[in-house]
Image: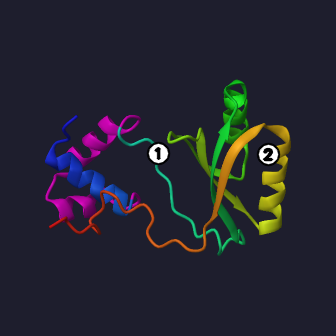
Amino acid sequence: MKIPQKDMMILKQLRNNARESLTRMARKTGIPISTIFDRMKQHYGSIITKHTCLLDFNELGYAARAKVTVKVERDVRQDLMNYLNKHPNVNSLYKINSGYDFMFELIFMNIKELEEFMENLEETYPIIDQNVYYVIDDIKREEFLTDNQISAP
C-alpha cells in the first residue's frame, strides 16, 4: 500500500509528538488543519492503531526489564499466548519464527520478581527452549518514521 506524501508527513509528526496541536502540525508541514484532521480520522483504527506515550520505567521504580524468546509444545501455544497476553508485567508480545514461538518483554520492580515469574512460567508450561536477555539501557526506541531519522546515503 503506497501512502501519499501528505499522509507520511502527518504520520511523522504524530510519531514525533502525538499530542502536538493540529495548528502546529499545519505550520510545520504546510498542510491545512482540516486535511490533517480528516487524514488522521481516516487512518485511525488502521494505520494509526493507538495513541500512547513512552515511559522511563526505571524512573517509575521498575528496574528489571528483559526480552524473552520461548519455544513450547504445539498443544500449549495458545494457552501460553493467552497467559502472556493477559499478564500485567508483559509489556509487548510477538509471535515469531526462527525456531521460537514467542518473544515478549517483561517489566518488573526487581530481578527477583522477574526470575520468580520465569520459574513459574517454566513450571506451568513445558518450555522446550528459551533465551532471556536483560535490558540494561535504551539506546534507541520508537524512532522509525520520525523526523529524527537520517536518510540512508
Residue shown at 60%/68% (left/top)?
A: 135
> Where is residue 73 shown, x and y percent of the image?
70, 31
| Label 1 crowd bin: few (<14), some (14–19), many (20+), radius 10 Å | few
Asked which quadrant contains residue 22, the reply is bottom left
Residue 8 in the image: above or below residue 20? above
Asked which quadrant contains residue 143, the reply is bottom left
Q: How many marks?
A: 2
Left or right, 12 with reference to 83? left
The quadrant of the picture occupied by the N terminus is: top left
Residue shown at 34%/58% (left/top)?
A: 144
Asked whether residue 84 is in view, the answer is yes
Between 76 and 31, the one lying in front of the other is 76
Main SS category, magenta section: helix
What amino acid is at disc 2?
Leu
Between 33 and 117, the one lying in front of the other is 117
Write down the region rendered in magenta. 18-46
Left or right, 147 with reference to 129? left
Residue shown at 66%/64% (left/top)?
A: 65
What amino acid is at disc 1?
Lys
> Which residue bears the numbered disc 1?
50
| Label 2 crowd bin: few (<14), some (14–19), many (20+), radius 10 Å | some
